[in-house]
Amino acid sequence: MEKNVMNPEKFHPDQFDRGAKYALYFELGPAAADIRLPVLLVRGSRPGKRLVVTAAVHGDEYEGVRTIFEVYHGLNPTDMSGDFLSVPVSNPPAFWNGTRTSPLDKGNLARVFPGSLKSGPTSAIAHYMGPSIIARADLYLDLHSAGIHWLMPTMIGYDAGDARSRKAAEAFGAKVLWGHPGMAAGRTVTFADQQNIPWLYTEAHGAGRIDPEDLATFKEGVFNLMRHLDILPGTIQARPVECHLYGDFDIDKGLAATQRGFILTEVNLLQQIHTGDTLGRLCDLLGEMIETYRAPADGVVAMLRGFPVVEPGEPVFVITGLLPDDPHHA
Ligand SMILES: [Zn+2]
């Protein structure tokens, strides 16, 4: 094997000398279509906790990729007590294809954990990435965004049932927090939860671009988490919380189009809405309205369709609630 290529089953960050950075690939083998998974590790000069960060679990979400590259290059191991372990591109076939899911098997890497070697390349990535990367975390952060097709507020999502997760979310320092009472099966964060590892994930505007403000929030957030874990010295610099959401999030359970069309959205992100309010309409190529989307409950717009062309079955809106004690709760 080449010098910087490893079998993931033989990888453990503790094998690497302290006080240095390591850039390597995991060779995932034939069950994963011979995908090479990029891994960036910074071993602090002194022992401590380990922050694990992943990005591009969905292949069209780019903010986290650049965040990991910039954090990796910006860290100085001599400042660190503990480690930064990261996968900047978690689903390389989807990433190179510019799509949320993999062109090899249509797999959604955020739905297949803990994975298997018998269910296609995407599931095989999960099979290797769970034990070798996520399970090594004292705190796990998965960097998502709204991708090419949707829009979401820049936010940090946490496990509302785990005080460790909520404290870490507050330390991350985003303007929008979202507490989740539960998380659906198959997620990266569900895998972390099953290992009793506190987890966080992000969302951001997406649209196939990297908004400089989103990049700044993500980078500051990762550094804040390293301070929170005492991996880095210094004080946490959190942005004031403007909105605290509470409720489940599953894009697959949002309002979906039932036919092909061109969407006209009529609400904004984080807008408060009431049951029955019109969120948007779908029209055909003559501009005739063919479908109307109405709020299924009182709440806040957490996600909306950004890319205006929709196919049947595609999610167009997600509504959630506000944390009851939130001062912005009207
Ligand atoms: Zn995503």
Image (spheres, grey):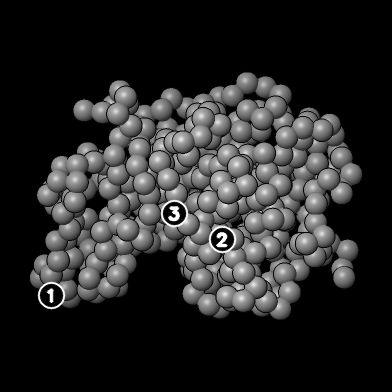
Marked residue nearer the N-terminal end (3 or 2): 2
Crowd class of label 3 (few under 14; some 14 to 19; many from 20; radius 10 Å) = few
Residue designated by label 3: 184
- Residue 273's x, y, as percent? 19, 42
The label on residue 113 is 2
Residue visible at 53% across and 64% down in the picture:
112
The residue at label 1 has a CB less than 8 Å from ligand 1: no
Q: Residue type at mark 2? A: Phe
Q: Residue type at mark 3? A: Ala
Q: Are marks 1 and 3 in contact (CB under 8 Å)?
A: no
Q: Quadrant of residue 230?
A: top right
User: For numbered disc 2, what is the local secondary structure?
Assistant: loop
User: For numbered disc 1, what is the local secondary structure?
Assistant: loop
- Residue 197's x, y, as percent? 61, 42
Residue designated by label 1: 286
Mark-to-mark CA distance, 1 and 2: 43 Å
Q: Quadrant of residue 222?
A: top right
Mark toward the viewer: 1 or 3: 3
Mark toward the viewer: 1 or 2: 2
Crowd class of label 1 (few under 14; some 14 to 19; many from 20; radius 10 Å) = few
User: For numbered disc 3, what is the local secondary structure?
Assistant: loop
Q: Closer to the camera, 107 or 21?
A: 107
